[in-house]
Image (cartoon, rainbow, N blue to C red):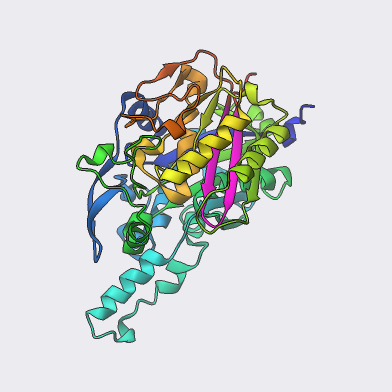
Amino acid sequence: MELPEEQRIVITGIGLTAPNGNSLTDFRSALLTGKSGVQDYEIRYFGKTLAGICHFDALKYQSRKDLRRGTRAGSVAVYCTNEALMDAGIDIKCADRSQVGVFLGITEHGNVETENEIYQISQFGYDCKYWSHHHNPRTVANNPAGEVTLNLGITGPHYTIGAACAAGNAGLIQGVQMLRLRECDLALAGGVSESIHTFGIFAAFAAETALASHRHPAQASRPFDKQRNGIVVSEGGAVYVLERLSDATLRGAKIYGEIIGYAMNSDASDYILPNTERQIECMMKALDKAGLAPNEVDIVSTHATATVQGDIQEIKALRQVFAGCKTTYINNTKSYIGHAMGAAGVLELAGNLPSFEDGVCHPTINVDELDPECEINNLVVNKPQPLGDIRVILNNSFGMVGINSVLIVKKYVH
């Protein structure tokens, strides 16, 4: 049964920054031409490593004072949100800003700022009088979304959703729900990450023997490949303009797609290791909510991070859910940009959305020798796969402490 227009939620704008592109057009081009955004990186205490680093113009929408007072995650969020509004053709100054909501997924927040402050006072014998008075507003969990409201004068609801690496999808799901509840009329939703600026995340993944290394940075992130050796940590963000279909139609907005299904659940089994059964349940719940059979999905965007067990467990789940689905194709975006944590799900979905227009499934790159335990029908590797009419994308995004999220987007046809 089709929902009434005021309950149907569509995507009308996308703003992003990724290690290999600062707009959807550039990002999509990089995915179709095999351009990686991973490069050499060095960070205090940990030393030399690899990372996905963004190179957006932070001063495009903020002053130098804003950058000094705020955070990298906030700056990413401000850039992406302004770009999304511009893409949607919305002048926020002409909108009722009390009816605009900002909902951003984050993996963690405050680590970067706290590490920086400890380093600064270490230069003064750990005298706390040198601790910044900006530290508290920088480290509260709602900071990235709050910085967006300050930048744009938005007075509607704002908060972040801490959902580990499932957070980007969670931000979009929250935006959908708030629009359906009529708690806002315009939702700015997505996810952001500043993770590469904390040495702790590199040290922790290294301690877990889960940090990628490779003599060629662009080849370091290699989900499904037999020689994969871990995660490439990345920064980035993507913010979507979400509207009710009735409102989008009324203003003649372009529509990237309609969010028709979603689900979130918990493994309740391990702090780190994924749970195949719970992933299956999450995908099936999202499909049920969307009113779809598995064989109606054209592209599955995988979460796979290039950890041995993570990739294998997700493929096991996909084999069960999509068994016998001859026209369902599977790809991965982390192979280009690494793992952007809180922004991962929304960047990966954004990279696939243009397939509704160009009919092409971008590949997983860096698969030189497929791990036999990751074999699955229609896994697109190393070169783009033209599919023709693509109508449904299913986006997986899973996180530590056992959190899973699935989002399903359908091509909008007038």
Q: Which residue is painted at 35% across and 37% down in the image?
A: 222
x, y (%) of residue 202? Answer: 33, 58
Position of residue 5 relative to residue 123, above or below, is above
- Of residue 328 and residue 236, the one placed in the foreground of this image is 328
Residue reaching furthest to the front:
372
Magenta residues, dominant SS class: strand
Residue reaching furthest to the right:
1
Q: Is residue 375 magenta?
A: no
Q: Is residue 303 visible?
A: no
Q: Which residue is painted at 49% across and 15% down in the image?
A: 387
x, y (%) of residue 250? Answer: 66, 29
- Of residue 383 and residue 161, the one placed in the foreground of this image is 383
Q: Is residue 62 visible?
A: yes
Position of residue 298 relative to residue 138, above or below, is above
Q: Quadrant of the C terminus?
A: top right
Residue 70 lies in quadrant: bottom left
Instruction: Provide the residue span drawn in magenta.
Output: 393-409
Q: How many marks?
A: 0
Q: Quadrant of the N terminus?
A: top right
Q: Which residue is painted at 35% across and 61% down in the image?
A: 207
- Of residue 206 and residue 292, the one placed in the foreground of this image is 206
x, y (%) of residue 102? Answer: 56, 51
Q: Which residue is painted at 47% across and 34% down in the image?
A: 350
x, y (%) of residue 206? Answer: 33, 58
Residue 308 lies in quadrant: top left
Q: Would residue 276 appear left or right of 52 to someone viewing this image?
A: right
Q: Is residue 395 magenta?
A: yes
